[in-house]
Image (spheres, rainbow, N blue to C red):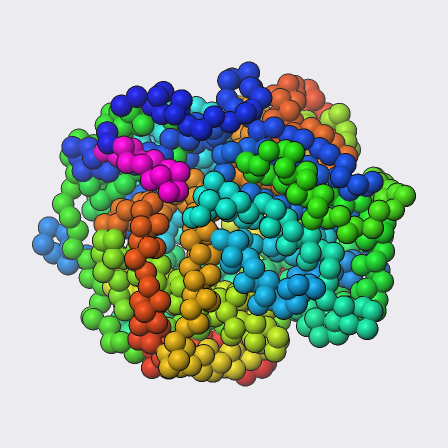
Amino acid sequence: MDKKTYSRVGEALWHTRLDNGLHIYVDVKPDFQKSYAFFATNYGGMDTRFQLGGQWQDTPAGVAHFLEHKMFDTQDGNALQDLAANGASPNAFTSSAITGYYFESTEKFEENLKILLSFVSIPWFTQESVDKEQGIIGQEIQMIEDDPMWQAFMNLLAGLYASNPIRISVAGSRESISHITADTLYACHKAFYHPANMVLCVAGNVNPQRVAELAREILPAQGGEEIVRDYGAPEPEHAAQPLRELNMEVSAPIFQLGFKADPAPMGQERLRQQLIGELVGEVLAGASSPLYADLYDRGLINKNFGVGYEAYPGCAFLAAGGESRDPEAVRDAVLAEAERLGRSGIDASLFARLKKAAYGSRVRALNSFEHICVQQAQAHFDGADYLDFPAVFDTISQQDVEGALRRWCTSERACLAVVRPKGAL
Amino acid sequence: MDYIQERESLPAFPALLRKEGWPMAELTRTELFPGVHLTAVHTGKFKSCVLGVNFLTPLDRETASVNALIPSVLRRGSRNYPTMQAISAALDELYGGSIEPMVRTRGEVQCVGFLGSFLDDAYTLDGSTLLGRAAGLMGELFLQPVIEDGCFSQEYTKGERDNLADRIRAQINDKRSYALTRLKQEMCKDEPFGVDRLGDEAHAAAITPQSLWAQYQHLLHTAPVEIYYCGSAQPGRVVQALKNAFSALPCCEERPPLPRPASKSAPEQEKNVEERMDVTQGKLSLGFRAGADVWSKQYPALMLANAVYGGTTTSKLFLNVREKLSLCYYASSMLEKHKGVMMVSSGVEFEQFQAARAEILAQLEACKAGQFENWELEGARRSVVSTLRSAMDAQGRLEDFWLGQAVAGIAEGPDALAERVEQVTLEEVAAAFQTLALDTVYFLTGKEV
């Protein structure tokens, strides 16, 4: 195993690649009681159309998430229970791009890691259990569909993108998941859950050599083929729709305002664009920007207002959202501020302190084992090295941020999604 | 590769040794001024330091909203940082530190103040130390508000009062927590515990800069103040920095500690409440009175009873009501340890309401009849112990834990409590189950068509 030290953030990662193609990263943390393991596949809600053995496959929306639910079933019972019986807190999530399984525990780490590696790599589905899960996931879908924040966000994505599958809800719909069978799940597991398409990240008071030994012992000796995926036709630069609206039982309008950014390149440049994108958001409408103070003073936004940058395969965007009595006024103010910044540039002292703040916040985030492991896993799939961010930070200039802001934050690239209270159209 | 060597090369950190040999955080508790206490956790394992300050005050229908508004208005501006933008700039200079207004309840005590997080001194780019400046900024925001005509700013009060009213109204947006809030209100109609941490819209709307100022002065002069620090600075330096930062606190004769909540027993016949709203999934919550609370010797046994019943993924509710019978999308139970109340929260299809309710209660009856296996108890124990131990690895959870202990006047740390949980016997858990009695059932269902 190789060890790489990141002295500026006080971290070190052990790394190895097994013969089956699995990459393993271990952050040794002797001062902590708990350990955390994250086992992820490069397969998420966006991956509905892909090639298997040279043939294009179209799968229903929601398979990756459905698989995540069903993977905990084992021939002998349920891995969730086995881990919980050891006092571990296991869970899993599916995003648009990846699916990850994890546990945190303060005891029996190796035993728990064995359970994690085996249940994720050995599928066990019956048609009966798949039918039953359709009910459970159907309930989950109903629950998220009742969430106005989620609705605003999904409508934003549907408004920004014409065909990129980021528009697809990760959980699918009640209708789409009704087409999922045990066979669908087996086929998708075979395609995406092989070691070469996965990564294992661990943080805690553990021996990295033992982590690698256990992975070698439990996982298949061979990796699978690389999967070709279809993320839709190339997207135009402009937003597909400028405005999307719906009504729900909410007390005040909830909105998401988005700007379509350039799709991010792979490798360390992707991390660089991430940092630039976050700074664009902070300069434009972050908590210490002039615009934020103005909107807050005018009662147009409240503490729930937030802004962020996100990148997925084939797409990247800035999103600012929250609650407002007048979302259109917020949008107009953000567009005017973007225009002003594009014209007269960013105040140099504002830029300097925002960069300092962004740096400190990112270092502080490393308190979380989950953050370290999930970010490292995502960066690994993106071909980047996450903990190297201080070096990347050094290369970002005010001109980089101004350039991105001028390109992305225009009315052509903007979409506003609003959830309005019932009866207030 | 030799990972043992790795361990030795870590910066030496003065610490007590636990029996397993791991360095452990050192805890000190200091009375900075009469009725003003500092709880400081000394540890070098985090990238950040956490600072907190809270007034502790009785939870009361009449004052809950005005108390809840105080930290938000204080956060708008101070003498040297009169605008939010000025505060944000100061925080940016402290490497993106945060100071957030906090309103929490612990049983029948309302805790209002600030929680801040800053980059630990070890990671600044220029080697500067942040603790003194961070504590100074928090102290200034807490004690030196912008003053207009002898009281709070009209503009800040009005702005934050509207935000508070919006937040109270917005509680309806999250149906899961709304159903629990409504359960508490219905179950504890005549007890302070039934008051929401933010109070209510009518009281919020009536607040003026003058009434807010009067209550702020009341807290400044009479409320116990709890200050918290967790980070790498030496305890002596922490005490000094915080004494300096909060030296403007009025030094009065006493800030009397707050009383414990009264315990009440469940009614003979439980109360049933049903509400209709335009939702696609129903929410069912149940409230129980427990015979123990955080002060009881039986508290660890009650923690385990709650975990066996509905507190974990090996619990009766999770395995039977959710997994086996698919009656709920989620079903779990939680303890309000400062009040001696247990609550069940679940999401159900409208037409499953009766079946889910019956099954949730049947599972409790089974527990009361002693129908839980040793593996269920041990799974619950591993989960409770692990949650307590890992709290020491998470700065936010640790702060929350110690605030709860400060409110209760209990000095026991998460590790010592975990030790007590290890010692609980099956008989003690069975006895804890016997004390649980159903008080109120709340059901949020869809609109009739």
Which residue is found at the position 35% from the left and 59% from the top? Answer: A275
Q: Where, quadrant-wise, is the N terminus of chain A in this rendering?
A: top left
Q: Classify residue A265 by image quadrant.
A: bottom left
Instruction: Where is residue B125? Give x, y as percent.
Output: 43, 48
> A399 above or below B115?
below
Is residue B412 toward the left or the right of residue A187 in the image? right
Instruction: Where is residue A237? Give x, y as percent.
Output: 27, 76
- State whether the magenta stretch is mostly helix, strand or loop: strand
Is residue A282 toward the left or the right of residue B63 in the image? left
Is residue B167 toward the left or the right of residue B271 in the image? left
Which residue is found at the position 22% from the left and 67% from the top? Answer: A232
Which residue is found at the position 43% from the left and 62% from the top? Answer: A352
Is residue B312 toward the left or the right of residue A216 in the image? right
Q: Nearer the viewer, residue A291 or B333?
A: A291
Q: Nearer the viewer, residue B184 or B96?
A: B96
**One can see residue B305 in this view:** no
Q: Nearer the viewer, residue A272 or B394?
A: A272
Q: Classify residue B436 by image quadrant.
A: top right
Q: Where, quadrant-wise, is the C terminus of chain A in this rendering?
A: bottom right
Which residues, given as a range, are shown in magenta? A3-16
Residue most extreme to the right: B253
Instruction: Where is residue A99? Give x, y as percent.
Output: 33, 48
Residue most extreme to the top: B19
Q: Nearer the viewer, residue B147 or B444?
A: B147
Which residue is found at the position 46% from the left and 52% from the top? Answer: A361
**Residue A4 lies within the magenta run:** yes
Instruction: Where is residue A16? Give x, y as percent.
Output: 23, 33
**Residue B384 lies within the magenta run:** no
**One can see residue B127 in this view:** yes
